[in-house]
Image (tube, rainbow, N blue to C red):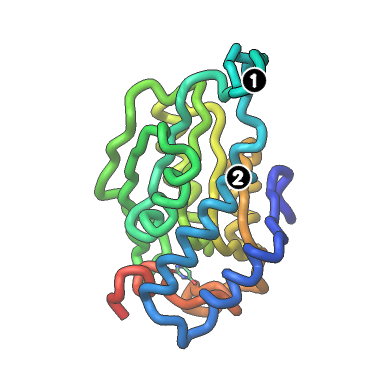
């Protein structure tokens, strides 16, 4: 199965930075910086359908009708803790975005998500909601987080993830076919411990130095 709304961003800058991140020798500070940079580039794709309005401005030369973002500010929701590695990249390009957090950890025995925190901005319906989680592995955590967002009223949701596994994409296609996925790569498979292969290891550990 594939996902009806998945975009794989094959831009050379994204692919180059991703390869550096996959390399086990890449130090933590570089890993964090690269993740932020890729996040910014993936956000560019995720925000492609934001509406524009025409607004009168004056350049140093003439008056003109200029395109400006229309509608309410988007919301970015970090799926803790690894989502925080993508958060600043989104805010770099959408500085007016409201920010929410969903805390889910993966029970290592069942690989199922357990919720421990949820703080969302009010009135998220009618806004573009960008959920960020670097690794779409089984898809259980992302699907649970998206379900929370829908319960809170979100109707226009895009999930940005750095890497996706086919299993996670299938899970999202089953549970949330309406949610767009923007990723840098669809990897081969999950291993017996639920890690994405070839992947880049534990994203949270590499971001926060908890290896
Ligand atoms: N979470 C990670 O951080 N890495 C994986 O490969 C899978 C889930």
Q: What residue is disc 2 on?
A: 44
**Quadrant in the picture for the N terminus:** bottom right
Give whichever of 146, 60 is nearer the camera: 60
Secondary structure beneath label 1: strand
The quarter of the picture where residue 66 lies is top right
Q: Which residue is mark 1?
A: 66
Q: Is residue 40 visible in the rendered structure shown here?
A: yes
Mark 2 to mark 1 CA distance (whole Å): 20 Å
Q: Nearer the viewer, residue 25 or 201?
A: 25
Give the class, few, some or many, for how many residues have Cα within 10 Å of label 2's Cα (few <14, many ≥20): few
Q: Sequence-wise, which precedes: disc 2 or disc 1? A: 2
Question: Measured from the top left, where is residue 204 in percent x and y?
Answer: 37, 67
Q: Quadrant of residue 148?
A: top left
Q: Is residue 201 left or right of residue 184?
A: left
Q: Nearer the viewer, residue 34 or 65?
A: 65
Is 110 drawn above or below residue 150 in the view shown? below
Q: Going by the image, does 131 lie left or right of 187?
A: left
133 versus 131 height, above or below: below
Labelled disc at residue 130:
none
Count every numbered label the image shows and give the total.
2
Q: Helix or strand or loop: what does disc 2 sit on?
A: helix
Say which residue appears at 73% left-offset and 54% top-offset: 2
Measured as percent of width and height from the top left, residue 53 is found at 62, 17
Q: Is residue 72 above or below residue 24?
A: above
The residue that appears at 61% across and 65% down in the rendered structure is 165
């Amino acid at each position: 199965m594939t996902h009806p709304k998945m975009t794989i961003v094959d831009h050379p800058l994204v692919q180059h930075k991703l390869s550096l991140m996959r390399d086990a020798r890449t130090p933590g500070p570089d890993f964090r910086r690269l993740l932020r940079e890729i996040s910014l580039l993936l956000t560019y794709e995720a925000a492609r359908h934001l509406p524009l309005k025409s607004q009168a401005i004056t350049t140093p030369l003439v008056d003109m009708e200029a395109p400006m973002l229309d509608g309410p500010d988007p919301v970015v929701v970090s799926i803790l803790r690894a989502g925080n590695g993508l958060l600043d990249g989104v805010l770099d390009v959408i500085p007016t975005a409201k920010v929410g957090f969903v805390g889910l950890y993966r029970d290592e025995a069942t690989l199922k998500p357990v919720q421990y925190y949820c703080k969302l901005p009010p009135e998220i319906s009618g806004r573009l909601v960008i959920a960020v989680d670097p690794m779409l592995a089984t898809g259980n955590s992302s699907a649970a987080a998206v379900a929370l967002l829908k319960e809170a009223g979100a109707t226009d949701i895009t999930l940005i993830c750095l890497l996706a596994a086919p299993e996670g994409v299938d899970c999202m296609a089953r549970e949330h076919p309406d949610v767009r996925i923007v990723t840098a790569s669809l990897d081969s498979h999950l291993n017996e411990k639920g890690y994405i292969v070839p992947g880049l290891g534990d994203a949270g550990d590499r971001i926060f130095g908890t290896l």
